[in-house]
Image (cartoon, coloured by chain):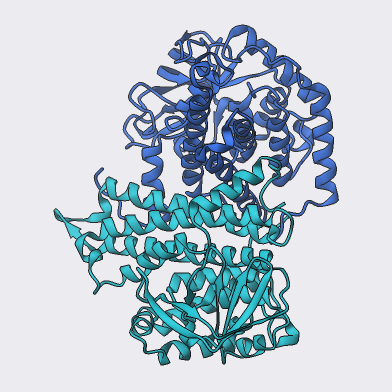
Amino acid sequence: MDLDLSPADVAFRDEVREWLREHVPREPLPSLETEEGFAAHRRWEQELHEARLSVVSWPEEFGGRGASLLQWVLFEEEYYAAGAPGRVSQNGIFLLAPTLFEHGTPDQQQRYLPRMAAGTDIWAQAWSEPEAGSDLASIRSTARRVDGGWLLSGQKTWSSRAAFADRAFGLFRSDPEAQRHRGLTYFLFPLDAEGVTVRPIGRIDGKPAFAELFLDDVFVPDEDVLGEVGEGWRVAMSTASNERGLTLRSPGRFLATAQRLTELPGALDDDRVVDAWIAAQAYRLATFETVTRVTEGGSLGAEASLNKLFWSELDVAMHETAWDLLGPDAEVSSWVEGYLFSLAGPIYAGTNEIQRNVAAERLLGLPRGSR
Amino acid sequence: MRFAPDREQQDMAATLRDLLADAGTARIARSWADGESAPWWEVWHQLAELGVTGLTVPPDRGGLGLGAVEMVLCLDQLGYAALPGPLVESLAFLPRLVPESPWLAELAEGQSVGTAVVAEHVPRALDADQAGAVFRSDGEEVRRLSGFRLQRAESVDPARRLFTVEHATAEPVAAADPGAAFDHGVLGCAAYLLGLGRRMLDTATEHVTQRHQFGRPVGEFQAVKHHLANVLLELEFARPLVWGACLSVDGPRGPRDVSAAKLAAGEAARTAARTALQVHGAIGYTAEHDLHLWLTKATALRTAWGTPAWHRARVARALATDTAPIGA
């Protein structure tokens, strides 16, 4: 049992640290949830890409550098410790890309991955619907077979950054006869296609990038079906496990927040600050345990639900603690955006109530049954 | 970087788990509490055959001379079994405190067990009437006590037989590093608490799967599921802190890291105890049910070897000057 880095890992980490020190913008970029901020963050993605740091874990042919899972975690730690901008491309690179690598055709990989790595295509996810949040199996949007492709219709909502994104990925019901999660198919489509209407929804912080999507007979060719027709649920679940588990929230973000928390006036007199710092360390160490298991051929299963519960509740706790420490200045402080964002954590990527059920049923083996 | 026990370490833990399961440790805990020590010593001799009693004893005293990782994995299993006795003292603390003591050979062979009074945090010697060696660690001063008179004090956990020690003589002994030894004791206690917590979770899980109410297994109810998921969550994120502290316990950040581990493990075990009791209903509140053997021990150990407040304050003091990661 060790946490020792090989010389190659140390060299990688040092290179990342050095590059970030020279390139991270001195002034924070405007919020990526605004049009101006979205554009600024897209330019930042392009700058990262030029240094081949936008998708370090991907194969070189798609714009990565074949970094190991451990190196990716190290990259993330350095990235957040350096105060680097949020990743406007994260839906694509963390949620869609793993699915493309696993289920995409060589043609799809060639068409989409390099553009994603370069920040040319920014992707939005089109999972949720007004009647289907954590219960994705109750999706109602449809895909109707036509010559050479499909016509997508219906409504998608709570789509992060869709107001300014270029393309979207999501599930549609391609077989209306099939039960629940059978009969869903995974589609990729451009947001400027004919028949797509994007309606921004002001988020809790008033930022306009959140959106709902209306699709009215949007044509998608067969080559933009990801995975097999009717297998969309299974294909999507491989993404969802990634989302809840490692890739959405690597420890770097929480370590950086915990560090900022300890630096607030009077912080170390507050028990909650000490507990939050310890919890962020626990998450980091748990991640190294997962990295060890995955590197040795294991997979990330229902443990992803525990991860999601842990980071989302830690994030809220840390921001609430900061709020109390800052007192009347909190509402005008630099913690506002993070605070509001943290409140969404227990909701998105599958609500924490659902994750607790998953943990109890799949990790402890408790009986399923009515809710 | 490989942050997981290796095969040999996993095998050692699994062997120990099987041995303890076969031994029927709940029965042993009850007899130990009643002052019948023979069944306990039988297990202790079996542990000696596995090498556990000399786990951290230096090889030149007949031990295996293994490190914190093995110590933690074994104490985790001993906690899972709730085996009573001065285990943290004998397996984690004393071999570090007095590594040159000839008595360690008796410990390694399984002929003896040791206990200690540790200034401020362990005021009463656990199971001193059964111990072949009783030490007192007070700051830098370490003494072996003899000619003592023991005054029994009842613990919340009947199987923790605590004694106030009045002694005739206190012979100074060569001590290695009392501070480091204390930190190994804290780490060992954290590991034992993890095991206790996991056992209470497993017991509770089994109970709610079998127990039916309103025509359904209790474990089908979402409220019950969420209780148990919370326990799992706390335990699963306390464990890496215990493992991480193994890597730094002998370095400058040892005190900070073992305190974080003890704090997290103690709080997780507390949550496990409260939840296990709640989902067992009134049966869990009876002396007939074994749950209380684990529950009362977790309650006692949460405040032994440093209270949560003391450990939290120690982490806070360290963070004022050093926020380097745990395990570094």
Please tell me whether residue A363 is drawn above or below residue A255 in the rendered image: below
- Residue A189: where, in percent of width, then height? 55, 19
Q: How many marks?
A: 0
Residue B133 placement, left or right of B227: right
Residue A173 placement, left or right of B236: left
Residue A247 appears in which quarter of the rendering? top right
Q: Is residue A308 visible?
A: yes
Furthest residue toward front: B168
- State the residue at coordinates (77%, 25%): A49
| Depth order, front residue of B311/A141 | B311
Please tell me whether residue B12 is drawn above or below residue A358 in the rendered image: below
Please tell me whether residue B251 is drawn above or below residue A79 in the rendered image: below
For chain A, give the colour.
Answer: blue
- State the residue at coordinates (38%, 57%): B272
Residue B245 appears in which quarter of the rendering? bottom right
| Depth order, front residue of B310/B232 | B310
- Residue A133: where, in percent of width, then height? 38, 28
Residue A138 appears in which quarter of the rendering? top left
- Which quadrant would the N terminus of chain B be assigned to in this image? bottom right
Q: Is residue B237 visible?
A: no
- State the residue at coordinates (42%, 19%): A156
- Residue A51: where, in percent of width, then height? 82, 27
| Depth order, front residue of B113/B128 | B128
Residue A309 placement, left or right of A16: left
- Residue A195: where, in percent of width, then height? 47, 9
- State the residue at coordinates (35%, 75%): B158
| Depth order, front residue of B162/B203 | B162
Furthest residue toward left: B214
Chain displayed in cyan: B
